[in-house]
Image (spheres, rainbow, N blue to C red):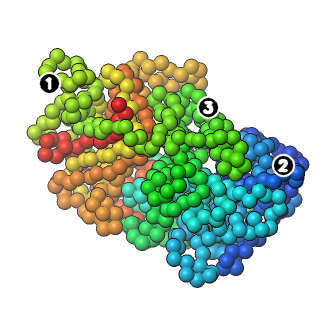
Amino acid sequence: MMPQRFECVPRAIVASVVLLCLPAGLFAQGVEYVKAHYTKHEHQIPMRDGARLFTAVYAPKDTTQTYPLLLIRTQSGLRPYGPDEYPNTLAGPSPLPHFAKEGYIFVVQDVRGRWMSEGTFVNMRPHNPDKKKPKDIDESSDAYDTVDWLLKNVPNHNGKVGLYGTSYRGFYVAAGLIDAHPAIKAASPQAPIVDWFMGDDWHHNGALFLAHAFNYMPMIGKPRPQRMKEPNFSKFDYGTPDAYDFFLRLGPLANVEAKYFKGEVPFWNEFVQHSTYDEFWQARNHRPHLKNIQPAVMTVGGWFDTENLFGALETHQRLEAASSNANNFLVMGPWIHGGWNGGQADGASLGDVSFGDKTAVFYREKIELPFFEFHLKGKGTFQPPKAWIFETGTNKWREYATWPPQNTQPLTLHFHAQGRLATETSRGIGFKPVASQHSDTTGWKPIPLAETGFDEYISDPARPVPYIDKIGSGMLTEYMCADQRFASRRPDVLVYETDVLPKDVTLAGPIVADLHVSTTGSDSDWIVKLIDVYPNDHPDPNPNPTGVRMGGYQQLVRGEVMCGRFRNSFEKPEPFTPGQPAVVKFKLPDVCHTFQKGHRIMVQVQSSWFPLVARNPQTFVDTFRAKESDFQRATQRVYRSKELPSRVVATMLP
C-alpha cells in the first residue's frame, strides 16, 4: 500500500474519452446521448510481438455513410471499462461536441503495460530506429499495428485516421508520426513531451522542477501489480495548503524516498540515478527521430504551459527542419497546459491577466475542427499559416510564414548600474530623447557600458525566493503570468528596468540570457525573468471580482532556470571556482509579446525559485544526494562591464 500521505484522485488522472479532465458537466452530452448515437466495442488488439493492447471503439450507429477514425493512445486509462459502460462525453480532441456531431469513429487505447493492456510499460519508451527482428517494438510500431488492425476489423470507416493527444498523450502522437501508417492523414501533438531533461516536465536545463515531479511521480512512476480498471496510483496529499513550507521542511531531496515514497515509486529511484544528461535521458529525446513525416501535423502549445511549452516549440521546430512535408503548422495561444481544450474554460483570461477574447473557443472552432475535417473528410478549404500565434500584450492573433518570424532584428538589453536596462545598439528604446548628432533616427540615445561594475546578492537556501506570491500546494498554473512585485522587493533578487517605452516593442521568438557571474560557492542556479511592467495608472479589470490592482503590475512574460553546473556541458557538470567570473548562457522559451507604449521592460535575476525548482545546495554535490550540511549561503555577483557584460538578447519585430 502507498503511505498514508497519498490519496486517490479519481477524476483528474483517469481521463476517459475526453482529452482532458473537465469540470463536471462542462460540454457534456450525457451518457444517454452517447448510448443513443454510438455503439461501443472493446478489443484486445495484437501487436507484432504478441502483446495485446486494450482498445475501445465508439462507432456511430448511423451506418449510411463512412467515417474517419480518431485515435488517442493514452497512459491515463480509457475508463469506463465494460462493453455496456459509456462515457459522459464523446468529444475527440475538443470538449465541445463538434466532432461527435460531425461524425467520427472514436478510438481510445491503453498503451502497452498500462491499465488493461498487456506488456510492460516503459516511461517515455525510447524509439528504436533499427527494428531488425520481426518482434522488435516501440511506440511507433504499436501505433502502426493498431491502425493496421483497425482498418481491417472496424467496419464503416473511410480509410483515413487522425491522431491526437495532449502532454504524455502528445508524446504518443509524435511517436506515431515516425514511420507512420499510410492511413494516418492528420495528427495533432498538443504540448507533447520531447525531452524530459532539457525542458519538459521534470527538468529545465538540468534543474529539477520539484513541485511538478513530486506531484506527478506517484501517478506515472508506480508500476501496476496486474491489469486494472481502477487506478492504483495516487496524487500526493501534502497535509497543508502551503507547499513552500512543506518542501522547506522536507529538507534534502534524499528525504523524498526515505520519508514518503519508500520503494513504492520505482521511477523516482530510476530518476535519481540519472542526475546528468546521460544515455537514459538522451534515449528519451525523440527530436532526432522526427524526420520524413508524411501526415499533416498541427502542433499546439500554450504560452503559459507550466509543463510542456518546450515540447510544443521544439516539436514544431524539428518537424520544420527535418521534414519536406509542407503540411506542418504551429498554433500557440495564451493558455496553460491543455487550456485550449477545456483546462482553461474559454481561454479569455489567466489569473489576473485578461486576453480580451475567448481564445480557446476560437481555436477549437476555427482551427482544430477544420484541420481534421479537411484532412480526414476533404471538407472545406483549410490553408493555415505556418504559424498561428497569439500575441500577448496586444491580445491579437498573428499569422506568420515561419516561426520564429523571419523579419526580426536582434534587441540586446544590457544590465547597467542603478538597475537600468538599456541597449548599446543604434536602436535604443525607452530612453529620454536627445538632440544630438549621435542619436539615431528614432531619437532615443543608448547608454554606454561602464568600464567596470557588478551587482551582488546573498542567496540563502534556507530562505529561497518563492515562485509565486500565493499559498498553494503543488505547482500553481498561473505563475507564468503572475505579478512579480513580491520578488522585485527581495534583497536576493536583482532588478533591471528600462525607462518608460515611447513606442510599442514586440518580441517574437527565443530569448537568450547571457550572463557573466561569480559565486562564493561551487554551484548555483541562475533564474532570469522577463517582465512587463504596467503603468502606475493602468486601469483595473471591470468587473473585478478579486479586487486586483493593475497599476504597476509586473507581469511575468517568460522565466527560465539554468543549473550552473551544466553551463558548459549537460553530460559532464563542472563546479564553479569560488569568486571567479564565469559565463552562464542559456535560452528561454519563445515569446510573442508586445510591451506597449507607456510600459517598461524589466529583467530579474535570482538563484532560487521555490518550490517550483528544487533548492541548489550551492556546493558541487549531486542534488539528489546532498546532505543538510551541503546547503550553504553564497554571495552571487552579476557583472555589467565592457569586458564582462550581462545581457538579455531577444528578437524584435520592426
Depth-wise, is mark 2 or mark 1 nearer the camera? Answer: 1
- Using the rendered view, name the quadrant where residue 432 is placed: top left
Find residue 119 and name its label.
none
The Cα–Cα distance between marks 3 and 2, rounded to whole angstroms, is 27 Å
Residue lying at the far bottom of the rendered structure: 133
Along the line of sight, the residue nearer the viewer: 248 or 446: 446
Q: Residue at x 38, y 44 (%)?
A: 510
Q: Residues within 10 Å of mark 2 (few under 14, many from 20)?
A: many
Q: Which residue is mark 1?
A: 438
Q: Which residue is mark 3?
A: 358
Along the line of sight, the residue nearer the viewer: 307 or 178: 178
The Cα–Cα distance between marks 3 and 1, rounded to whole angstroms, is 47 Å
Q: Which residue is mark 2?
A: 34
Looking at the rendered structure, the secondary structure element under dot 2 is helix
In the rendered view of the protein, which quadrant contains the N terminus? Answer: bottom right
Answer with left or right where residue 92 lies relative to residue 401. right
Residue 431 visible, this orientation = yes
Looking at the rendered structure, the secondary structure element under dot 1 is loop
Give the residue type at disc 2: Val
Depth-wise, is mark 3 or mark 1 nearer the camera? Answer: 1
In the rendered view of the protein, which quadrant contains the C terminus? Answer: top left
Q: Residue at x 40, y 25 (%)?
A: 596
Q: Earlier in the sequence, mark 3 or mark 2?
A: 2
Q: Position of residue 240 (x, y in %)?
A: 55, 48
